[in-house]
Amino acid sequence: MNHWLGGVQAGCDYQFAGSFVIGIQGDYAWTDAEGSHDSAREFGVVYHSKTKSLASVSGRIGYAWDRFLGYVRGGGAWQRDDYWATTIIVGTAYAGRETRPGWTIGIGGEYAFTNVLSGFVEYSYYDFGNPAIGLTPLLVGLRPGFVDIKETTSVVRAGLNVRFGGYAAR
């Protein structure tokens, strides 16, 4: 599925004399990614999820060729999700919300248009594991529900960076 993602990021880099670059970055994004699937165990039950936000803090290492930087990154990630279950008889029967921790790894390239402005394109893979998610019943008489949700996400991002201090100040 294709969905939108928009956000902000901040970070810092250090370039060694031999063109190697290390850095750290944090990002936060809002999204509308939504998915659903039919239950394999219950007739007429559909499970839904909607990702509201995606964030990460990661380190990166790369190599600079003149104004181009190629890099890999990896670190911790968090995803805010809404979940609900619907049935063909009663409609929405269960709902839940959770912020899931996980990890990310990615690869990207960044090009410095000027000493202050650069653009980047990046692919990142996110894995949030397979924990049991608690769902609250919305109808009287239903017991609390739990569902195992394995969640991985692939994201391609493109954006602009404004640099402050360091090389940008020269």
Image (cartoon, rainbow, N blue to C red):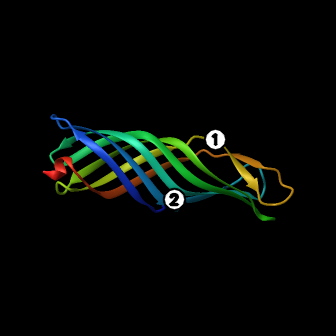
Residue neighbourhood size for the residue with mark 2, other residues' Cα within 10 Å, grouped as few (<14), some (14–19), many (≥20): few
Residue neighbourhood size for the residue with mark 1, other residues' Cα within 10 Å, grouped as few (<14), some (14–19), many (≥20): few
Q: The residue under label 1 is which amino acid type?
A: Pro
Which SS class for mark 1?
loop
Q: Which residue is mark 2?
A: 1
Compared across the picture, whether 117 is left or right of 131 comes to left
Q: Earlier in the sequence, mark 2 or mark 1?
A: 2
The span from disc 2 to disc 1 (Cα, nearest Å) is 23 Å
Q: Which residue is mark 1?
A: 131
Q: Residue at the location (63% across, 46% down)?
A: 149
Image coords of residue 168 (percent x, y): 18, 52
Compared across the picture, whether 78 is left or right of 124 comes to right
Q: The residue under label 2 is which amino acid type?
A: Met
Residue 114's quadrant in the figure?
bottom left
> Considering only vertical position in the picture, is 84 above or below 74?
below
Compared across the picture, whether 3 is left or right of 159 comes to right
Image coords of residue 86 (percent x, y): 73, 61
* Residue at the left extreme, as displayed: 170
- Number of numbered tags placed on the structure image: 2
The answer to whether marks 2 and 1 mark residues whose Cβ atoms lie closer than 8 Å is: no
Q: Residue at the location (32% across, 58% down)?
A: 159
Image coords of residue 102 (percent x, y): 52, 41
Marks 2, 1: nearer the viewer:
1
Image coords of residue 164 (percent x, y): 24, 53
Q: Residue at the location (39% across, 57% down)?
A: 8
> Considering only vertical position in the picture, is 6 above or below 102?
below
Which SS class for mark 2?
loop
